[in-house]
Amino acid sequence: MLKKTQDALRRADKIFIAATSFMLLTAGVAVGDVPSTDQLQQPRAPIVLQMHAVPTPALQARPIQAGYKPDAFTANQIAALALVAQSDCLADAMYYEARGEGVDGQMAVAEVIYNRMRSGYYPKTICEIVFEGSGLHTGCQFSFTCNGEMNRRREAADWRRIHRLALRIVLGQARLGDLTDGALSFHAVDVAPGWSDTMERTTQIGNHIFYRPVRHAYTRAA
């Protein structure tokens, strides 16, 4: 157990150093990994991350799930673990929902998650939103969280690229615009969920159609 704890602390330290360096060196990221210019305007402050709000499915096989007490970590390590957990959850959604949709499609999925956080109708953190209902046989908000898709091997190159983008979004370095016109939901073009008839369609990006509630007074973040 001591060795596991030490390994977890070392990983958290590396994450904190990497995240800090990442914020300082984002200008040096390869061109192929950078979203289009209109999506990378002046960065806004990232949404505050809450460690206690990360649900169990989002942290499988991660150090914080090994039963360690919060006081076993320094403040920086706790912040680093929270950061990596939230960016992992966002990357999961972007990867499984839109890995073949290009940067616009992946940013659009991230937009929906952030729109939900700001809406007042959904949970307040990325992980809570992505894994909402994942413990139920029906009712998961994102199908990949409950249909077994996460058990399949990921394409390593795609995952690294998308995870890097997700981390930039969480850090506030890649600014989300309004590609989806305030959408809170979406579905693939080859399905027709019953809920889509009760919502207002906003746009189509790649193979996804986006929606917001009818007469939804969505207030964009400043």
Image (cartoon, rainbow, N blue to C red):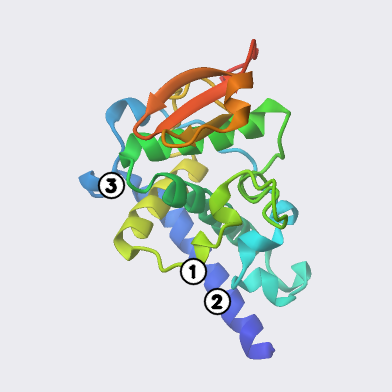
- The kind of residue tagged 1 is Lys
Q: Which residue is mark 2?
A: 10
Task: State the image coordinates of residue 129 (x, y, percent, origin top left).
Answer: 65, 44
- 215 vs 68, left or right, is left
> What label sits on residue 33 in the rendered view?
3
Q: Tell us which disc is closer to us: 3 or 2.
A: 3
Answer yes or no: do the residues labelled 1 and 2 have beta carbons within 8 Å?
yes
Q: Which residue is mark 1?
A: 14
**Pointer 3 or 1: first along the chain:** 1
Label 3 – label 2 distance at C-alpha: 28 Å
Examine the rendered structure and indicate whether residue 116 appears above or below residue 4: above
- Spatial CA distance of label 3 from label 1 is 22 Å
What number is the disc on residue 126?
none
Rounded to the nearest angstrom, the CA distance separating label 1 from label 2 is 6 Å
Residue at horizontal 50%, vertical 44%?
171
- In the depicted view, which residue is nearer to us: 66 or 153? 153
Residue at figure coordinates x 45%, y 51% from the top left? 96
**Image quarter for residue 52?**
bottom right
